[in-house]
Amino acid sequence: MILNAARIADMLREGQDSDTPDPLVITPTASIQEIERSGSASVDLRLGTWLAEMRHARITHLEPAKPEPEQDEKTHEVELTKLHYVRYGSRYLLHPGNFVLGATLEWIRVPSSLAGYIVGKSSWGRRGLVIATAAGVHPGFKGCLTLELSNVGEVPVALEPGMRTCQLFLHRVEKGHLPQHVDTSHFIGLRQPALGHVRRDAVAQKLASA
């Protein structure tokens, strides 16, 4: 069941109480009253100040079969991507056919009873800017969400920190006999866009060697 605006507002109010054991937190956010009055079933999120683009001159292609480098993940990301800090009041031009990673301005904490997903604002999609998230928002997630931004249109799009780019939908997680899943991925706690890793799992390795 997807949460409506009234329930999201109630949970955000509860999250402001330090005694709430497993709160929903979205900060900074529009006023809770504004969310409640919207009558929607989502919360708008804004683009943050960090963007990451691929270093095309350093790589010819991405291959999941290639072994991971013998170095820490942060060094690996620095070799593959270039970070840009875009100040408030400035802009980053995303040209047609180009792709960058962004991060939400908002820091989010999702309780263990909820999960979510991101949908790009249709007003931007109609202008050629496709916005997605690198993964679903799992129970227990904490941090800024990494966004995938692609310009599939025919003219450059100006990306400005603080602009509303996407909306977060939240739904309840059904309780079962097993302990509820809590996100423990390396995306937890990040405030900048993260590339992550692509690798073959055990099944793909067996299929490749067949």
Image (spheres, rainbow, N blue to C red):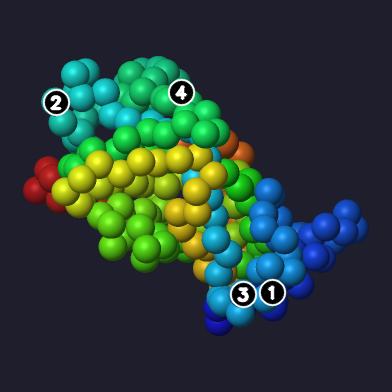
Work out whether mark 2 precedes mark 1 in sequence or the reverse, and give the earlier one: 1
Quick one: SS at disc 1? helix
**Numbered disc 4: secondary structure:** helix
Q: Nearer the viewer, residue 117 or 176?
A: 117
How far across and down, in percent of the image, does residue 193 sit? Answer: 46, 37
Q: Is residue 121 above or below residue 191?
A: below
Mark found first going from the N terminus, 1 or 4: 1
Q: What is the x, y in percent for residue 85?
A: 48, 26
Q: Amino acid at mark 3?
A: Ser
| Labels 1 and 3 touching (C-beta < 8 A) | yes
Looking at the rendered structure, the secondary structure element under dot 2 is loop
Q: According to the image, label 2 marks what residue?
A: 60
Q: Which residue is mark 4?
A: 74
Percent across and percent down for residue 124 are 35, 58
Residue at the disc numbered 3 = 38
Residue 67 location (% of width, % of height): 26, 28
Left or right: 174 in relation to 103: right
Q: Amino acid at mark 1?
A: Glu
Residue 17: tell me if it is visible.
Answer: yes
- Please, which residue is most extreme toward the right here? 19
Look at mark 1 in the image and give the residue it sits on.
36
Q: Nearer the viewer, mark 4 or mark 3?
A: 3
Q: Is residue 138 above or below residue 36?
A: above
| Sooner in the amino-acid sequence: mark 2 or mark 4 | 2
Closest to the observer, 143 or 161 = 161
Q: Tell me which amino acid carries mark 2.
A: Thr
